[in-house]
Amino acid sequence: MNLMLCMHGEAEELPFLPEIAALGAGLELGSYGMMGVRSESNWRTRLSMHEAVRSQFAGPLAVHGPFIGMDFAHIDHLLKEAVQHRMDLTFDAAQRLNALRVVVHGGHKPEVDLFKIHGPWLRECTQFWRQEIPRWADAGIQIVLENDFQDSPDLLVQLVDIVDSPFLGLCLDIGHQHAFSTLDAVEWVRGMDKRLYHVHLHDNDRTGDHHWPLGRGTVRFEPLYEAIQRHAPGATLSVEVQDTMETKMADLRGLAERFAVFRDTLGPKE
């Protein structure tokens, strides 16, 4: 099982890069969505921080792209232009960071369910991704669409199947699924099946999207891992916990041991 650790690129994270590499894990660099979108200078600052991280880390790397307001099915041409501009910036960042994969939210809004406009949403998203994905494919970078608060993976699965490109897959955010869906996590994995390329791991108690360390909440991880190994064994497990780096590393170490991917390159212990 491939492993990654979500980071923002802050200075206090950098001392852990050698151990992350020794564990055979990669990085998922983010914070474009919350910090980078506030101004052009904030975006440049975030990208510069990530380039500094990249200069010290040669392993596999993913980017979590912006997500606030990223409605790929928007009918307003001005807002569609803004979404496209953000995707252009994200494409540039992914290339500069030599990323293998970019995570973006699927763009499913409450109105889609409230007004039962699943067909128009699917049609507009299909048109967007059919036009967008070829340049990512040419660059060798995968896009994975992450679930937000939808109850099932069905629409995202349909979208990926219609676009039909190996460079467009799915990301299962287990915290979102646990907090917002009535469908069991194993059913999500079964529904996504081979389309599942990436998994965000964090915990909660169904009262909100808390991003707690693994085991603090009520997510049942073992059945999830077993389902992933059965249906999408090539998927990457990315620890998206919001806590101290030592807490995040403890979860990463536990997963490395769980999946027997630890590479003992740190030398003998004292």
Image: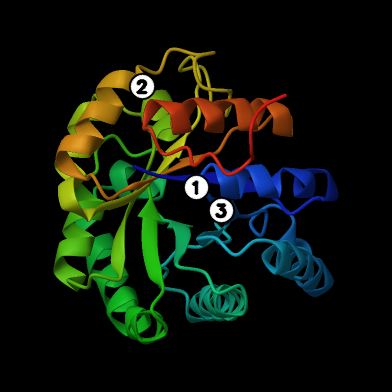
Q: Amino acid at mark 1?
A: Gly
Q: What whole-number distance in Å separates the C-alpha atoms at marks 2 and 1?
A: 21 Å
The label shown at residue 221 is 2
Question: On screen, 239 above or below 157?
Answer: above
Q: Residue at x 34, y 78 (%)?
A: 133
- Asked which quadrant contains residue 52, the reply is bottom right
* Image-based side of 254 in relation to 97, left or right: left
Of 150 and 121, nearer the camera is: 150
The answer to whether marks 3 and 1 mark residues whose Cβ atoms lie closer than 8 Å is no
Comparing labels 2 and 1, the label whose residue is closer to the camera: 1
Front residue of 132/238: it is 238
| Inter-mark Cα distance, 3 to 1 | 14 Å
In this picture, is 221 found above or below 229?
A: above
Q: Is residue 120 visible?
A: yes
Image coordinates for residue 12, horizontal then vertical, percent: 83, 43
Q: Secondary structure at mark 3?
A: strand
**Reading the chain from its start, which is encountered first: label 2 or label 3?**
3
State the residue at coordinates (67%, 66%). Answer: 54
**Which amino acid, mark 2?**
Phe
Query: Which residue corresponds to the image point at 36% horizontal and 32% vertical from the top-left?
Result: 259
Q: Amino acid at mark 3?
A: Glu
Q: Which residue is mark 3?
A: 28
| Disc 3 residue crowd, few under 14, some 14–19, many 20+, Cα 10 Å | many
Residue 44 pos. (x, y %) = 78, 73
SS for dot 1 = loop
Relative to 201, say whether 232 is above or below.
Answer: below
| Residue on which the image places disc 1 | 24
